Image (cartoon, rainbow, N blue to C red):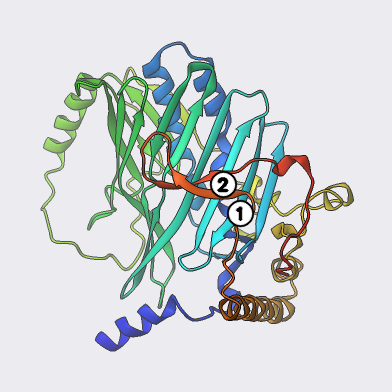
């Protein structure tokens, strides 16, 4: 057992074969937070602080929905790698940069094209290996500013766990508490992402409450992060929970890890009478299963046309040769290129340490988060001026 645990601990250090990857960089993967940006625009348009919090909570849940069945590993970004995305149809533009390699930290900054919001954060996925599963705790703060209301919301994402990494069918769950704070009003939304449990009854479930600064419950939220989120009056929700618990007295048991992914009782969520639908997932395209279980949004992330190629910086991961080769189905070439790029990065690091030269990030700098005071990566500005010079040669 200890031998196996040691092997798994070392997994975080070794180069994984390209066959375990999906043809996207982690910078592109985190851009998938933006798929349901309409929820941010909706929040901006509402006058009630509780209704705005409902939309922000729905956005926070929807941001992790694309992880469902995504068992391919995104490529680790190279130090200095960047990614940008402009979506006029969804009303935002986003920039991200790999700001640290050890530990791996990715910073991003998105803004509404109508100056209605700013959404930024940094992610440092802390990995833990548990024999048959790997747990990724996404350290880092998400900050959403609704500029028209002069409001800021912060939260951290739930823990993601991939089961059966050694043998069997891979499956994913997310669990842990997510606390969203409105720093202007003191309102909080505390959401619990449920672990699947021994009989799979809780698989994918999310529930919690929005409360005011004196902790009075204003509304209850429930649903599944793979499907939908509803809001309902707290008293109605508690009566339903009490009744549900009575109907299914389940024997409590210590933490055991199910081997097979439990099948939920039914794919859909029971809708408590009087509930309001806040968010519903967009169905995946019919060919998704053959395409790494990508959503339609994910499928468009690596698109590159001549016009775009002439304006993006040379550090953009659309230009990264190993990912491009994998997307084109050239697996051997992807593998060779991945090795070459990783070796190039190691050589550059050795050369820097010899000359005692520190790596300088280009578009982000470290500083305290303006709302939580915790250490964060803040956007330095000027990226969209398209004036790129002295960029590192990372590919």
Mark 2 residue element: strand
- Within 10 Å of disc 1 (Cα), the crowding (few <14, some 14-19, many 20+) is many
Figure check: 161 above or below 193? below
Residue 117 quadrant: top right
Residue at (57% x, 24% y) in the render: 41
Residue at (21% x, 65% y) in the render: 256
Separation of disc 1 and disc 2 at Cα? 7 Å
- Write down the residue under mark 2: 108
Figure check: 178 above or below 122? above
- Residue 263, image x and y in percent? 36, 54
* Contact? badges 1 and 2 (CB < 8 Å): yes
Task: Tell whether 343 sits left or right of 191.
Answer: right
Inspect this view and state whether residue 293 appears.
no
Residue at (44% x, 29% y) in the render: 56
Mark 1 residue element: strand
Task: Tell whether 205 sits left or right of 314.
Answer: left
Task: State the residue in front, 214 or 34.
Answer: 214
- Residue 196, image x and y in percent? 29, 53
Task: State the residue in front, 125 or 275.
Answer: 125
Residue at (32% x, 46% y) in the render: 265
Closer to the N terminus: mark 1 or mark 2? 1
Task: Tell whether 306 sits left or right of 1.
Answer: right
- Within 10 Å of disc 2 (Cα), the crowding (few <14, some 14-19, many 20+) is many
- Residue 210, image x and y in percent? 29, 25
Number of the label disc, if any, that sits on residue 97: 1
């Amino acid at each position: 057992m200890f031998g196996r645990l040691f092997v798994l601990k070392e997994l975080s250090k070794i180069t994984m074969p390209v066959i375990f990857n999906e043809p996207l960089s982690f910078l592109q993967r985190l851009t998938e937070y933006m798929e349901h940006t309409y929820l941010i625009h909706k929040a901006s348009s509402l006058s009630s602080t509780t209704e705005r919090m409902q939309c922000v909570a729905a956005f926070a849940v929807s941001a992790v929905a694309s992880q469902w069945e995504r068992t391919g590993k995104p490529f680790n970004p190279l130090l200095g790698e960047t990614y940008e995305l402009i979506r006029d149809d969804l009303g935002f533009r986003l920039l991200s940069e790999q700001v640290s390699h050890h530990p791996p930290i990715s910073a991003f900054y998105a803004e509404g094209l109508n100056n209605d919001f700013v959404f930024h954060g940094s992610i440092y996925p802390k990995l833990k290996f548990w024999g048959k599963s790997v747990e990724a705790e996404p350290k880092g703060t998400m900050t959403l500013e609704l500029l028209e209301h002069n409001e800021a919301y912060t939260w951290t994402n739930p823990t993601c766990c991939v089961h059966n990494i050694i043998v069997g069918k891979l499956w994913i769950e997310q669990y842990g508490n997510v606390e969203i704070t409105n720093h202007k009003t003191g309102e909080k939304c505390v959401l619990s992402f449920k672990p699947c449990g021994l009989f799979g009854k809780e698989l994918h479930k999310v529930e919690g409450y929005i409360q005011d600064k004196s902790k009075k419950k204003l509304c209850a939220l429930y649903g599944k992060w793979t499907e939908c989120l509803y809001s309902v009056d707290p008293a109605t929700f508690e009566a339903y929970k009490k009744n549900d618990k009575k109907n299914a007295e389940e024997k409590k048991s210590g933490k055991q890890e199910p081997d097979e992914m439990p099948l939920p009782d039914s794919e859909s969520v029971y809708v408590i009478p009087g509930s309001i639908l806040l968010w519903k997932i967009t169905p995946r395209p019919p060919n998704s299963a053959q395409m790494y279980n990508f959503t339609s949004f994910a499928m468009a992330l690596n698109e590159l046309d001549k016009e775009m190629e002439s304006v993006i910086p040379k550090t953009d991961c659309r230009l990264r040769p190993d990912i491009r080769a994998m997307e084109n189905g050239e697996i051997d070439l992807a593998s060779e290129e991945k090795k070459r790029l990783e070796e190039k990065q190691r050589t550059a690091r050795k050369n820097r340490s010899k000359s005692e030269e520190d790596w300088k990030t280009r578009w982000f700098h470290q500083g305290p988060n303006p709302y939580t005071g915790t250490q964060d990566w803040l956007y330095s500005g000027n990226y969209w001026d398209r004036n790129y010079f002295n960029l590192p040669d990372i590919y």
